[in-house]
């Protein structure tokens, strides 16, 4: 599995996919990447060290993802991120976190000592679909609540049961309330959630303009950031 890449297009940055302890929730209906979680701290520390050793600081920005939330990274890995950021001139970190950790975001910012952009897997601002179908366990009702804590929501599109209206609303809310966002096209995986290919075709056509939008990154495949498998 590829775990390091340099993103050269929108928001240039280095990105690493590290290993962390099991996701605090771990029950999202569409998610099978928690398979990358581990309980073997020594193995995680060794692997994460190897990946982090590739970071050069060339873009001054580092995104760290870990099939969960940054709070699930082993403490030794968090220390290493902080040290490498200092040594290699990283001015900003990107982390991701579940809604459940929203009260701890500042704690991590203070620990790292440099600005952190927090991503959150919102999937959709439609409460019913997010909670009943996707089982996200992120109980906010309005985008403003998310914007109070997080900088950059990740939206998922092209899921069976989702509608064009939901997607229109989600993208409108990302544009209105956030400076940055990510839109991922759902691709079938080992879960029971299925892609709606017609909806994907519609999205790709209707939202082709997002390719030119500097604030929103669109992932047509899970591996479009150059990490994962
Ligand atoms: S919070 Fe993220 S890692 Fe955890 S189960 Fe949901 S999608 Fe998967």
Image: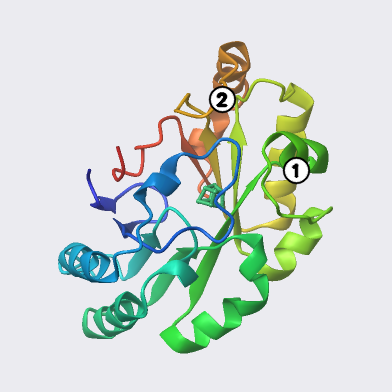
Residue picked out by circle 2: 192
Give me the C-alpha separation between circle 1 and circle 2: 16 Å
Label number found at residue 131:
1
SS at circle 2: loop
Seen from the viewer's position, the closer of residues 127 and 176 is 127
Q: How is the image coloured?
A: rainbow
How dense is the environment of label 2, judged by Cα within 10 Å: few (below 14), some, or many (20 and up)?
few
Q: How many marks on residues? A: 2
Residue that appears at 23% across and 71% down: 42
Q: Is residue 113 visible?
A: no
Label number found at residue 120:
none
Image coords of residue 106 (percent x, y): 59, 82
Seen from the viewer's position, the closer of residues 211 and 29 is 29
* Left or right of 89 in this view: 125: right
Image coords of residue 159 (percent x, y): 62, 25
**Is 18 situated above or below 31?**
below
């Amino acid at each position: 599995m590829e775990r390091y890449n340099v993103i050269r297009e929108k928001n240039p940055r280095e990105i690493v996919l590290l290993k962390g302890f099991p996701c605090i929730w771990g029950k999202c209906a569409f998610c099978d990447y928690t398979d990358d979680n581990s309980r073997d701290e020594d193995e995680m520390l060794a692997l994460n060290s190897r990946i982090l050793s590739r970071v050069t600081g060339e873009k001054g920005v580092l995104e760290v993802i870990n099939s969960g939330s940054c709070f699930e990274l082993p403490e030794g890995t968090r220390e290493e991120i902080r040290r490498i950021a200092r040594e290699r001139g990283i001015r900003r970190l990107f982390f991701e976190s579940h809604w459940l950790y929203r009260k701890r975001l500042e704690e991590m910012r203070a620990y790292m000592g440099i600005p952190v952009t927090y991503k959150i897997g919102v999937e959709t601002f439609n409460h019913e679909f997010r909670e009943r179908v996707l089982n996200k366990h992120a109980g906010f009702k309005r985008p403003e609540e998310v914007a109070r804590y997080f900088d950059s929501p990740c939206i998922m599109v092209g899921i069976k049961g989702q509608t064009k209206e939901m997607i229109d609303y989600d993208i409108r809310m990302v544009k209105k309330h956030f400076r940055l966002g990510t839109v991922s096209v759902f691709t079938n995986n080992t879960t029971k959630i299925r892609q709606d290919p017609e909806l994907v075709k519609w999205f790709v056509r209707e939202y082709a303009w997002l390719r030119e939008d500097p604030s929103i990154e669109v992932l047509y495949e899970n591996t479009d950031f150059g990490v994962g498998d």
